[in-house]
Amino acid sequence: MVRIAGERIADLFALAESESARPHPELANRYVVLARKIGMRYNVRLLPEYRELYCRRCSAFWVEGRNVRTRLRAGVRVRTCLACGRERRTRLHPSRSPATQSLPAGPSPVSRDEASVAEVELDSPEEQDEDEESEEG
């Protein structure tokens, strides 16, 4: 059922896009309402590209310049629905979370245990005795 619901949602958004080009976009808004109801009934999330196409308050299918105004402010896209006045803000450049940041390009970091083992191996008593004998002789 979930697969069928997802297909139906995709079909409804395609129909809404084709109807929005006509002079009376009420049918496009109705298709958005139906797609949202199907998504809620079958617990199917709308794809991100579909979520950007309509107003979440009044379910109006957005057509740039006709019923939505888009402004760019300090790295944030602000879309204002001209039917109900609701503003929707989205970041243009999402911040990177610490989990997704890559490690520095330098040498690989060494843990404290590995570093202390390396120091102990270099400073072993046998090596120190050999170094002292070579310096004396």
Image (cartoon, rainbow, N blue to C red):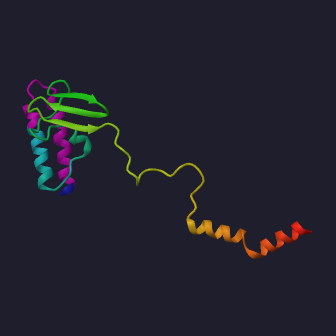
- 122 to 75, vertically: above or below: below
| Quadrant, the C terminus | bottom right
Residue 130: give x, y in percent of width and height: 83, 72
- Residue at 16%, 56% (x, y): give it: 43
Give coordinates of residue 67: x percent, y percent: 14, 28
Residue 70: x %, y % from top left = 22, 28
User: What x and y, as percent, mark residue 51?
Assistant: 21, 42
Residue furthest right in the image: 137
Please state the extent of the stretch shown in magenta in the rendering: 3-29
Q: Nearer the viewer, residue 112 or 84?
A: 112
Name, please, the residue furthest toward the front.
Answer: 136
Left or right: 76 with respect to 55? right
- Give me the residue at 60% from left, 53% from top: 107
Choose between 70 and 36: the one closer to the eye: 70
Q: Could you tell me which residue is drawn at 12 percent across and 28 percent down?
A: 82
Q: How many labels does the image show?
A: 0
Q: Is residue 107 magenta?
A: no
Q: Residue at x 67, y 67 (%)?
A: 119
**Left or right: 17 in relation to 115:** left
